[in-house]
Image (cartoon, rainbow, N blue to C red):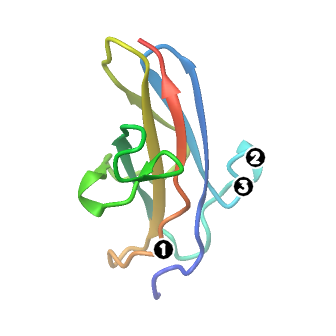
Amino acid sequence: MAASTATPGVRLYFGDRGRIRGHFGPNPANKNGNGLPTGVHGVIIAFAGTTAGVGTAGGAPTGAEAWLRLPKRSGSPFVHEVETAAPRTFAYRCRYVNRKGELGPWSAPVVGTVTP
């Protein structure tokens, strides 16, 4: 099956200290109606710590080299634990991947700040 042309939605929760919880999929706000589309094996999640005003668009980095990957996920939600001594802004985006490793398009970045 070809790579999905669908773009996953991303919803983040930054209310826990040192932790970002994220949901992804076609309906990330609804845990009961948020299965992966047909043919999708998982999701690749990329994140970046951002610096306001330095190569950013809406708080997200504009260069591909700024994004790091989390391990591939097959289900939502995910938890990303971060160590920071001061509040820090992070951006996240994700894309679907099929069993052949073919990738779909990136989602729009979602940005938020985590507290230590």
Q: x, y (%) of residue 100?
A: 33, 79
Query: Looking at the image, which is closer to me, 7 or 112?
Result: 112
Disc number for residue 105? 1
SS class, disc 3: loop
Q: Earlier in the sequence, mark 2 or mark 1?
A: 2
Q: x, y (%) of residue 26?
A: 67, 61
- Label 2, label 1: how far apart the Cα atoms are: 24 Å
Q: Residues within 10 Å of mark 3 (few under 14, many from 20)?
A: some
SS class, disc 1: loop
- Label 1, label 3: how far apart the Cα atoms are: 17 Å
Residue visible at 54% across and 50% down in the picture: 58
Determine whether label 3 and label 2 are within 8 Å by CB: no
**Mark 3, residue position:** 27
Q: Amino acid at mark 3?
A: Asn
**Mark 2, residue position:** 32
Q: Amino acid at mark 2?
A: Asn
Disc number for residue 93? none
Task: Please state if 47 lies on the left or on the right of 25 as rendered.
Answer: left
Residue projecting furthest to the bottom: 2
Q: Residues within 10 Å of mark 1 (few under 14, many from 20)?
A: some
Q: Residues within 10 Å of mark 2 (few under 14, many from 20)?
A: few
Q: Earlier in the sequence, mark 1 or mark 3?
A: 3
Single out the mark in the foreground, 1 or 3.
1
Q: x, y (%) of residue 65?
A: 23, 58
